[in-house]
Amino acid sequence: MKKTIKITGGISGVIATGSFQNLRPTFSWEETIEDCEMTDIEITERIKELYGKSFAMLKEAEQKAIVERIQRERQDLRIILSDKGNLLPSVTSIIGYDADFFVSPEELTQYASQGNIIHSKVTHFINTKEWVLAKALQDVWTDIVILTKGNLKLEVDIGDFPEFLKKYPISGMTVGTRFMYDDEGYCGTPDFIGIPDFKEALKIPTMFDVKRTPDVIKNGMQLAAYCKYYKLKQAIVVPLNDKTAQNFSKPVIYDEKKLEGYFQMFKNKQKEFKQRYSI
């Protein structure tokens, strides 16, 4: 006998890890089926499907709340929700999550802005072969304001990438794009990949990262995490700064063995990050 039925499936929960003390989201689905010929078993299965959809939405709400909580505490940390539904902190966020123990959040922001400007200028050069002042790049205007208004009075334009390349040639340069590494639980955006053509390095596809001030350990962990995803066996830091008359310093090279060691250090740091932010 045909009949009209309503099928409902839903869920509610309490999220204590969000940006507020407690969130109580509720998600529910309701379907009205006229002239229904479904069996009791089929109806039960449909209810389970609706419950599953509601549970997935609750899980997504929880993850978004976690991101909001972390970013309210530390605006410089970056966490994204992957296509597979995983929370993926950036490599630099994992490595620098405890940096505010030594430097104020305001100063961290200024250093980050100077790094963003250097990165954008290098990216522009790789794409256009033009080395321009920061003011010519629209995407760094906010960073310029942060530096000019900041208490550290950091320079807006530092480094000379074209001159670096004259002494340390690199061929086949391609700008890095953001990746999501669900298997290892992190994301990242490399600066660029290329093949070094100078005697100190192997002439193989290499991960490059531009830094204002190199930090052997932190840079090693960052590049090791990038190389793990891209399956590269060499990484190089390009120091661009105003500490020398030539506006650059000698590159720092990481071979395969060093990268393996630094990746283990990175994974230990990742465990600390997860414990600190409960993700």
Image (tube, rainbow, N blue to C red):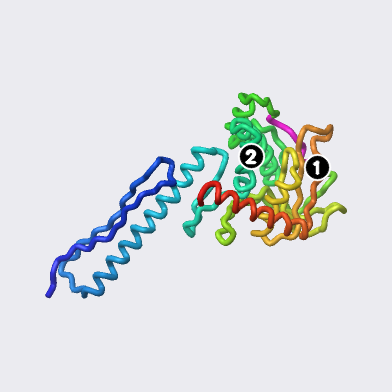
Magenta-highlighted residues: 156-162
Image height check: is 92 above or below 55?
A: above
Task: Quarter of the image for the N terminus: give it.
Answer: bottom left
- The nearer-to-camera label among 1 and 2 is 2
Residue 134, how many percent across, how many down?
Answer: 66, 33
Taking 205 as reference, is 70 above or below it?
Answer: above
Please name the residue shown 17% across and 65% down the image: 5
Q: Nearer the viewer, residue 97 or 101?
A: 101
- State the separation of the CA atoms marked 1 and 2: 29 Å
Residue 60 visible within the image = yes
Secondary structure type for disc 2:
helix
**Residue 136 visible to an observer of this rendering:** no
Residue 72 horizontal/vertical position (percent): 49, 38
Residue 176 percent location from the top left of the image: 65, 51
> Is residue 252 found left or right of 74 in the rendered image?
right
Depth check: give the residue in front, 159 or 188. Answer: 188
Q: Which amino acid, mark 1? A: Phe
- The image quarter in which residue 113 lies: top right
Classify residue 90 as left or right of residue 63. Answer: right
The residue carrying pointer 1 sits among few (fewer than 14), some (14 to 19) or many (20 or more) residues within 10 Å by Cα, namely many
Q: Residue 164: which numbered mark, if any?
A: 1
The residue carrying pointer 2 sits among few (fewer than 14), some (14 to 19) or many (20 or more) residues within 10 Å by Cα, namely few
Residue 6 within the segment the image draws in magenta: no
Query: Mark 2 belongs to which amino acid?
Result: Ala
Provide residue 169's location: percent of width, then percent of height. Answer: 81, 49
Q: Residue at x 45, y 51 (%)?
A: 63
Identify the residue under disc 2.
99
Looking at the image, which residue is at 70% across and 35% down? 132
* Left or right: 278 in relation to 6: right
